Image (cartoon, coloured by chain):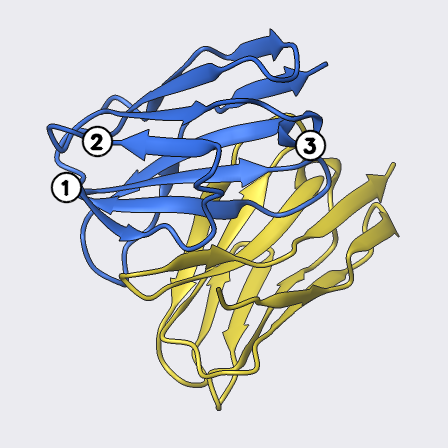
Chain colours: A yellow, B blue
């Protein structure tokens, strides 16, 4: 199945610093979804992007979909300890629903 | 709205034994997924059902793993015989049909094979 790569794999930030994770695909994506998984928890849906160049915001989180629909990013401004977890991107084609490799975020108080 | 239900939450078995997991999706969700998540990795899709039909099972190790969704509602995933490398969290998720739908996950079953 298609593999969506995410970088970095791990990120440690000081509380209050910004954080960005990137999702890259070798093929055009029909959509990109972002999920957050807290330690010991299960993935929880955050947002979906469908249109080329689309940008969506949720409070301190900004999500972007690339113009070529082959990459996406999630940016968190001024991280808080509640942001700790692993962030996954995923593509749902209707017939396949594959997750990226994930970025694990640690926030140091 | 009730979420995706999974049982058991935890299971410890010896290698070569068999094990089964159960999942009840959100009511009305036609699509059901089973994922395997090994510690530190992303969820790996094992099988995807649309109602009671299989849409994608390309990553299911069919020599030891099987899954069914006979009435198009709840589903079971079985491993027989288990290997040490099957130790993982098995996540069930469901969604409405279509490609722009989000997945709702259950709490997962943590399997340890010793």
- Assess whether mark 2 and mark 1 are in contact (beta carbons under 8 angstroms): yes
Distance of mark 1 from mark 2, alpha carbons? 8 Å
Q: Are marks 1 and 3 on the same chain?
A: yes
Return the chain for callout 1: B
Quarter of the figure with the C terminus of chain B: top right
Earlier-in-chain disc, 2 versus 3 = 2
Image coordinates of residue A81 in percent, x first then y, are 75, 37
Which label belongs to residue B69?
A: 2
Q: Secondary structure at mark 3?
A: helix
Picture quadrant where residue A30 is located: bottom left
- Judged left or right of residue A30, residue A7 is right
> Label 2's element?
loop
Q: Is residue B87 above or below residue A101?
A: above
Mark 2, chain letter? B
Choose between B57 and A22: the one closer to the eye. Answer: B57
Q: Classify A76 as above or below B3.
A: below
Residue drawn where x is 46% and y is 57% of the image: A98
Mark 1 and mark 3: Cα distance apart in space: 30 Å
Q: Which residue has dot 3 on it?
A: B85
Question: In the rendered view of the protein, which quadrant contains the N terminus of chain B?
Answer: top left
Instruction: Confirm whether circles 2 and 3 share one chain.
Output: yes
Q: Quadrant of residue A97?
A: bottom left
Between label 1 and label 3, give the one nearer the viewer: 3
Residue B99 coordinates in the image, percent (x, y):
27, 63
* Up-down relation of residue A19 to residue A68 (above or below): above
């Amino acid at each position: 199945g298609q593999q969506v790569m995410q970088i970095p794999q791990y990120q440690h930030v000081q509380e209050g610093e910004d954080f960005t994770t990137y999702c890259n695909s070798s093929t055009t994506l029909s959509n990109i979804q972002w999920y957050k998984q807290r330690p010991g928890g299960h993935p929880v849906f955050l947002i979906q992007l469908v249109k080329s160049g689309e940008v969506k915001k949720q409070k301190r989180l900004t999500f972007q979909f690339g113009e070529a629909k082959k990459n996406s990013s999630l940016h968190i401004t001024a991280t808080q300890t509640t942001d700790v977890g692993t962030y996954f991107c995923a593509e749902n084609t209707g017939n396949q629903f594959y997750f990226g490799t994930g970025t694990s975020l640690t926030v140091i108080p | 709205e009730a979420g995706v239900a999974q049982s058991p939450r935890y299971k410890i078995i010896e290698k070569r034994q068999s094990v089964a997991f159960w999942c009840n999706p959100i009511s009305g969700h036609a699509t059901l997924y089973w994922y395997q998540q090994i510690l530190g990795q992303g969820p790996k899709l094992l099988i995807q059902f649309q109602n009671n039909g299989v849409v994608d099972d390309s990553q299911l190790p069919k020599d030891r793993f099987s899954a069914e969704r006979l009435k198009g509602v709840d589903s079971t995933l079985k491993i027989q015989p288990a290997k040490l490398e099957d130790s993982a969290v098995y996540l069930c998720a469901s969604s409405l049909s279509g490609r722009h739908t989000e997945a709702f996950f259950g709490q997962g079953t943590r399997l340890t094979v010793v």
